[in-house]
Image: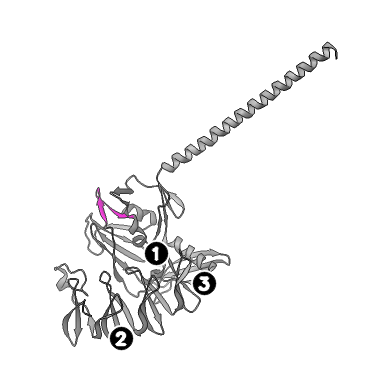
Amino acid sequence: MNLEESNSFVEQMERNNKNKKTVLTVLLICTLLIVILVGLIVYMKYQDSLKQKVFVDNKQVAFSQNFLKTQGNTNYINIKELSSMLGYSYQKGEYKNYTEDANSCYLRTPYEVVSMIAEQNTVTKYILNEKFEDTDDMKKDENTVRSELIVTNEAGEKQLNIVVNSEHEAQETIYIEEPIQLIDGELYMSYSEVPRMFNVSLDVSQENRVQIYSLDSLAISAAQYAEKAGYAEISNIYENLTAIADGMIVVGDGRNFGVVDVKAGKELISLKYEKIVYMQNTSEFLVTAEGSVGIVSKGGNTIIKPTEYEDITILDEISKLYKVKKDEKFGVLNGDGDTVVYCEYDSIGVENGEDFRKEGIRNFNLLFDEFIPVNVNGKTGLIDNKRK
């Protein structure tokens, strides 16, 4: 090899080394940029995770700085603002009391009114069955169609027509463990009470994230779940749809009805009843079989067999007393299904409650939380509710 060739070889080697260094430098810079980019993404996600966000049916919604409050170990949600998010009407004062008191309010949906007062352990719900004028889209029936949901499934789309079971406005009292709070002049409800009061699902398992699923969204998901599980239908009675917020679905096979626990994925009540109606105030089911009615708990335990009584209504939710009807006479059973008042009275309760209203009576069917008024042949008496 001559000197000229030797110099050319050395120059070529130097160029190759220089190119390698350039490539390595570029790779190093690219790697560094990627690391920085990934770091920025992680940092931005982390910063984003620190921001409080609220979602309704998987859509992020705006909220005020007063929407969420914490007092002690309890987290609260602003009732008025949550009502607005869900499309509920919010009014100050108790339902039908026509005041502007800031320490009470009521929410109104197409199906019910929820009336509440700060610092009290009870909330009153009024299930509405307002009659609509006959139209092409809405027909007057014993159960009035209130709205229609479109359920999309593997078989295509189908309608779920929501109806209300009660023929008239029905009132029920619901006990709450965490009372409504008046904070800075506004009413707040604890996280634990939101699902039953608003008939929604509330997921706060992820830090700084509040996920709210409306009743319509839950009903559509329930119908899709039932179809996949092999059930022909879900009950379209509004009262039964409220059970979905408690993790239960009233399902049917086209003839009979039962209840499924969604979380456990099993039947709580087998499909053998002609009709089932969920009683949200006691978290129990009114079941009908061969014309008789009974009570089954949400755990699937029979409290009152559907073999004897023509009708059963809640006499008192807190004391767990049921008014039963048999052969046109009325009596009372307790929460264990035992007889407290035999079915031998024309009616139960005070017929003119206005006489007792000034006395602060909570329930005119259970005076002073102890005595049950009974009426027969035009005469009234009192029976101790703890009588066995």
Number of other residues with Cα within 10 Å of mark 2, as a class: few under 14, some 14 to 19, many 20 or more = some
Q: Label 3 vs label 2: CA separation?
A: 34 Å
**Quadrant (top left/top right/bottom left/bottom right) for the C terminus:** bottom left
Q: Earlier in the sequence, mark 1 or mark 3?
A: 3
Estimate the x, y position of residue 340 in percent, counting from the top left.
24, 80
Q: Earlier in the sequence, mark 3 or mark 2?
A: 3
- Which residue lies at the image location 85% right of the left edge and 15% below the top edge? 1
| Residue at far front of view | 1
Give SS at disc 1.
helix
- Which residue lies at the image location 19% right of the left edge and 71% below the top edge? 369
What residue sits right under mark 1 in the picture? 246
Relative placement, left or right, of 116 versus 383 is right
In the depicted structure, whether residue 232 falls above or below residue 58: below
- Of 363 and 175, nearer the camera is 175
Q: Which mark is residue 326?
A: 2
- Which residue lies at the image location 43% right of the left edge and 51% below the top edge? 55
Give SS at disc 3.
loop
Magenta segment's dominant SS is strand
| Residue at far top of view | 3
In the depicted structure, whether residue 290 falls above or below residue 295: below
Relative placement, left or right, of 209 versus 118 is right
Q: Earlier in the sequence, mark 1 or mark 2?
A: 1
Say whether residue 373 is magenta: no
Corner quadrant of residue 217: bottom left
Estimate the x, y position of residue 23 in percent, counting from the top left.
67, 26
- Of 374 and 295, nearer the camera is 295
Q: Label 1 vs label 2: CA separation?
A: 31 Å
Where are the magenta residues, as a range?
Answer: 180-190
Q: Which mark is residue 231?
A: 3
